[in-house]
Amino acid sequence: MTGKWKIGIAVSVLLLGGCAKANTLPKKNEPLTLVVATDLHYLAPELHDQGERFQRLIEQSDGKLTEESEALVDQFVQEMLQKKPQAVLLSGDLTFNGEKLSHQRLAQKLQVLTEAGIDVWVIPGNHDLNNPSAASFSQAQARSTESVSAAEFAAIYQNLTRHSAISCDPQSLSCLVPLAEDVQLLLIDANRPEDPGVVSEETQRWIETQLEKAQADQQTVLSLSHQNLADHTTMFSSGFTARGAESVRALLDTYDVRVNFSGHMHIQHIQKQDGLTDIATSSLSVAPLHYGVITLDADRTLHYQTESLADPALQSQAKLCFDQTTRRQTQRALEAMELSPQEKAAMVELAVTMNDEIFAGTLTQNAEWILQDPVWGLWQSRGKDLFFGQYLQAMLSEAKSGNNEITIALR
């Protein structure tokens, strides 16, 4: 027996069995409320001391509020306890860099939801498994720390639901799980260590088998992935859309699966391609600290709308962190250019404003104002060859409304 098959069998046993599971599900056609969140990038507090090396990491990062990841997850858990959805769906990059201790601490926090009667379904992201960057930070030092395998990931999170999986793919952490008597969730894992970013042919064959049976059983199926299953924008396709997505979309279309929930990009964006609506929720660890609330009516019409963590202090810190990151990046990019200090400062601040709105999914609301702003003219004439200039231009030219809410008939 190969190592891959041993891992697949071990994972399947954990997810199909685990501890004793309740078999009561919401009834057929009973309205449902779900919550989806992604890219928590949780870092256990024992793994850093807010010291010099950790602060340098934060300054070099992409704007995540990593230093407050403990407070972010605690706030999210409290809001879920108040909302009481039937299930919480977490679509990968649960941890900062796959630290085993971060996975263990996060599972402990999420267990509170399970004990309150809320199922928590998770899949790994590209940061979560066998990550050589897993580290702890102490004063001026960074030291390697233990990460997790696929089997260890499954074992850590196996007791977060009251229901067993219907089926698990022996080749990956993909699973089909029940949400109600007539609703199922297909979790699609594209993060196998041996082929990261790919929905493999073997997994696609497993998906087809599950969808064929679900259709025969008159089930409504939603899907969840970390990588996107649609090409969202010019700047967020390569490296963000799962390889094999085109054939996965064709499979989902064949069996009338109309919506996928994803993450990975950290921006809030909704894109329809080949009959599939891919709803990418922005990162819970990046301003504006979004998660998505999903309601399914009795007729299985789906409504999705973003909400933000309701903690003003965390919101303020997250915006400050993200804006400082954008400022550092654009200041460095403009440093060598022959522009006046006033022109550089104005270009930086416009970039900050635009990047805030890109990640919040609201850029289109101010598109006309931006196009008429003389500072945007500077970006077009003087900054067009810079990466940040190309990024802003692409996002503005492709900006559209409707990234924060959508209604989709699932039948």
Image (spheres, rainbow, N blue to C red):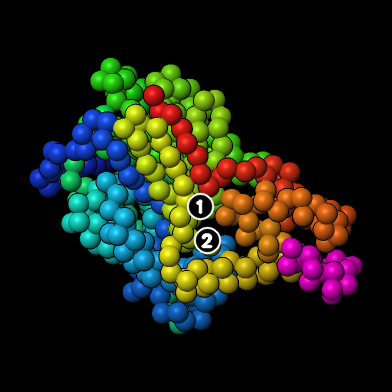
Q: From this viewpoint, is residue 16 visible? A: no
Q: Circle 1 is placed at which residue position?
A: 282
Q: Which mark is residue 40?
A: none
Q: Which amino acid does the dot numbered 2 rest on?
A: Pro
> Residue 410's spot in the image, x, y percent?
40, 28
Q: Dot 1 lies on which element? A: loop
Q: Is residue 157 left or right of residue 207?
A: left
Residue situated in front as seen by the camera: 110 or 206:
110
Q: Earlier in the sequence, mark 1 or mark 2?
A: 1
Q: Disc 1 marks which amino acid? A: Ser
Q: Quadrant of the N terminus?
A: top left
Name which residue lies at 46% across and 47% down.
305
Residue 330 place in picture, x, y as percent:
72, 65
Residue in front for this viewpoint, 147 or 344:
344
Number of marks drawn: 2
Disc 1 to disc 2: CB gap under 8 Å: yes
Badge 2 marks a residue whose secondary structure is loop
Q: Position of residue 137 (x, y in %)?
A: 43, 74
Q: Is residue 379 above or below residue 303?
A: below
Q: Quadrant where the C terminus lies?
A: top left
Residue at the (73%, 67%) spot, across then down? 349
Query: Does residue 349 show up magenta in the picture?
Result: yes
Image quadrant assignment for residue 43? bottom left
Residue 280 drawn at (x, y percent): 50, 44
Q: Is residue 296 left or right of residue 316?
A: left
Part of the protein shown in magenta: 333-350
Q: Name the quadrant containing residue 76.
A: bottom left
Residue 350: quadrant of the picture: bottom right
Q: Is residue 267 visible?
A: yes
- For label 1, count other residues whose C-alpha is less than 10 Å away and answer few (under 14), some (14-19) or many (20+): many
Q: Which residue is mark 2?
A: 288
